[in-house]
Image (tube, rainbow, N blue to C red):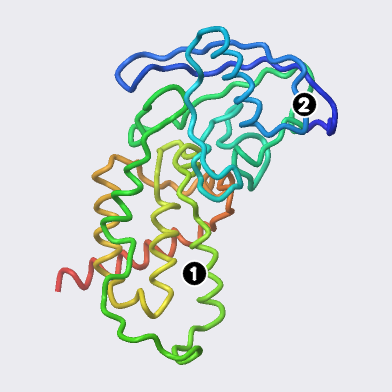
Amino acid sequence: MGGNSGKTINVTLKVWRQKNKSEKGTFETHEMKGVSTDMSFLEMFDVLNERLINEGKDPVAFDHDCREGICGMCSMYINGRPHGPKNAVTTCQLHMRSFNDGDTIVVEPWRSAAFPVIKDLAVDRAAFDRIIAAGGFVSVNTGNAQDANNILVPKHDADDAFNAAACIGCGACVAACKNSSAMLFVSAKVSQLALLPQGKVEKETRVLNMVKQMDVEGFGNCTNTGACEAECPKSISLENIARLNREYLFASANDKK
């Protein structure tokens, strides 16, 4: 990592360009000179796109929204790592001070059959939405709101549910996995609800339906390499995958009775 705060650097960008999911893509090289190290990675791309537009060229398509590490839209594969070289940050939280003068930076979209390329660096992650629609919610009638602390939740369960709920659905886990597995994402969403009283009522149908939809979408199998946890910007734990496997095993056994 470079300690270049407040300085400017020159970098070479090799950016993946692809018109749509059916056409072949290729890398396009751009020389970025005088880049402030205080810029975020996305701000640097804004500068590139402004230059391309002024030159009458097609700007690079990439996803972004909040630019505060909340929405998970800023999905870029940077120098072989989802969201870039720093741990526990999204691309919008990555700054150019993390790079050195003269660096070559290779930027690609998420690589997964379940995340087809829309254009350039933007991919279609609607598969995650369909998995959530299959069961990532509470639909039972829970009645009127009860007094605070009337439903006791062990602190350990509350903490685990809160940590699982931190998943922003960016897809870095899929991009990092050699099998393009979505198990960390699905397990976080299953854990978030299965640990709390309101979610326990539907926990068996939830896990069966969500895992079934995950398989339909074409995600790969989990082989526990741990790359997903290592690259997750919210540090979602692999323990959630173990919990998902237990929930699925019990639900499958009851489903056959």
Q: Is residue 118 left or right of residue 102?
A: left
How far apart are the two marked residues, 1 and 2, measured between alpha carbons? Answer: 40 Å
Up-down relation of residue 9 to residue 113 (above or below): above
Q: Secondary structure at mark 2?
A: strand
Closest to the camera, between mark 1 and mark 2, is: 2
Query: Which amino acid does the dot numbered 1 rest on?
Result: Ala
Residue 219, percent from left and from top: 33, 41
Q: Which mark is residue 161?
A: 1
Residue 54, percent from left and from top: 57, 11
In which image quadrant can residue 205 be found? bottom left
Crowding at dot 2, Cα within 10 Å, few <14 / some 14-19 / many 20+, comes out as some
**Which residue is most to the front?**
54
Q: Nearer the viewer, residue 64 or 204?
A: 64
Q: Nearer the viewer, residue 54 or 44?
A: 54
Up-down relation of residue 206 to residue 254 (above or below): above
Q: Which mark is residue 13?
A: none
Q: Which mark is residue 36?
A: 2
Residue at x 43% of width, y 46% of height: 223
Q: Is residue 11 left or right of residue 235?
A: right
Query: Which amino acid does the dot numbered 2 rest on?
Result: Ser
Q: Nearer the viewer, residue 106 or 69?
A: 69
Up-down relation of residue 185 to residue 139 (above or below): above
Residue at x 79% of width, y 20% of height: 9
Q: Nearer the viewer, residue 157 or 94?
A: 94
